[in-house]
Image: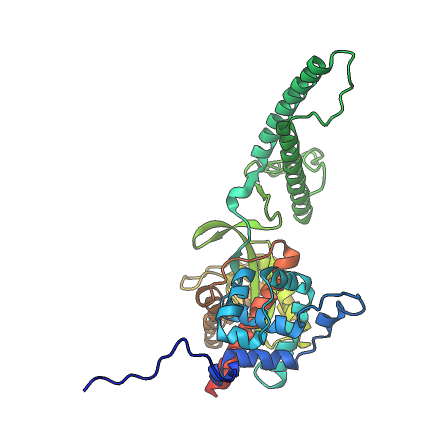
Amino acid sequence: MPTSFRPYLPDQTLLLPPALTDWLPQGHLAYFVSDTVEALDLTGLYDRYEGDGRRNQPYEPRMMLKVLVYAYATGTFSSRRIARKLEEDVAYRVLGAENFPAHRTISEFRLQNLKEFENLFMQVVRIAREVGLVKLGTIAIDGTKIKANASKHKAMSHGHMLKQEQRLRDEIRDLTKRATEQDLDEDGLYGAEFRGDEIPAELSRRNERLSKIKAARERLEARQAEEDRNAGRTPGDDDDRPEGKRGPDFKRKFGEVPDKKQENFTDPESRIMKTANGFQQCYNAQTAVDDESQLIVAVEVSNNAGDVGRLVPMLDAVEAMVEEQPERILADAGYRSETNLLVLEARGIDGYVALGREGKKVTVGVTAGQDATARMKLKLATKEGIAHYRRRKYLVEPPFGWIKSCLGFRQFSLRGLAKVGPEWMLMSLATNLRRMNAQMVWT
């Protein structure tokens, strides 16, 4: 007897159009994203459309937000890929409801609503707080390096900038001389005047390149001067040292940039940072994760590779998000400083900040002015301190694993601190919704 197969008629058309929701199972993440967006206050998204008299009908902002959040929650960050998913993926088509915005429209929507992502992220965190998901008893803080949308090969050191500037000036001088001589030959000594539109293309390119290098060098020098001021130095402090003062002289003058210090031309606000894959052009993305739910309750992005200066800003960010400070803070040795520990004590927060790398014996010398460090050392040596700090790794590391390894968000799509910060907010918002949906499915 021949085998009987189920009917398969790929060329048969449907008599009635099916509902796309029939093709998407219950409990799917797309439904949760849609329901959550409908519950949010989206006034900020609609304000920019009021009274502008536009002729073309724009796409519904709610629909665009749902698609964008779902895309980040499922590991699709390119506007071109999102546009392609709207045609190929059932979940995207359910959210888009037969709307197919072009990739430029998706990219522009993301750029135009950067300021709104912080408000939406805050709304989701506060909703989670109201329903009891976020307890705010213990918060773990950590940072991770996310690659900038720039190549480290598009950077130049300060020493090389000086050499290139001199080389370009010499070439421009020679080309200008040659162009002038050529004009005199063509027009005659008493012929038409030199108009300027006869400058060769090579000269224009060199002038443009010189301007870019000069601007990058000036940014680098201004940043170095600011860093020196923050370090307590003042202009001329290497010349007016008091007579008889002990100690070594300064290695360089105030504001003098080391030759190896670099500036990136593609994204000047990004910095070279050490990662697991070597030195890369990166930003330092910070997160604060709640103990009970493992939801991200606050985020921040900086271009400083070190974490030590981010503890207080992250505490302020947590309080701004939920209008309440946490009871307990867990942080690794990257946040260790006498100032940070004193701030925790002053705010009444039960802090556990490591004084050295995990798994290694900590030998902290307590000198004058390090009383808070001495108290933290005693605190971490107790059974309670060991038990509390041990929870840090499994609280704050998993969200980084979800974002970077599972979803593949290892590089920002946008450039500049003003843009990568909101994009990190959007990524964290999408991660929270994915986590909340999983908790609801399994409870």
Residue 111 horizontal side relative to residue 296, left or right: right
* Residue 178: x %, y % from top left: 65, 18
The one nearer the camera, 197 or 308, is 197
* Residue 30: x %, y % from top left: 53, 78
Q: Residue at 77% across / 14% down in the picture? A: 191
Residue 69 horizontal side relative to residue 214, left or right: left
Position of residue 172 relative to residue 90, above or below, is above
Position of residue 276 relative to residue 20, above or below, is above
Q: Quadrant of residue 319?
A: bottom right
Q: Residue at 64% across / 38% down in the picture? A: 212
Q: Quadrant of residue 325?
A: bottom right
In this rendering, does residue 431 appear at all?
yes
Give the farthest residue toward the left.
1
Q: Residue at 67% across / 39% down in the picture? A: 215
The one nearer the camera, 427 or 191, is 191
In this rendering, does residue 306 appear at all?
no
| Quadrant placement of the N terminus | bottom left
The one nearer the camera, 139 or 21, is 21
Residue 292 horizontal side relative to residue 233, left or right: left
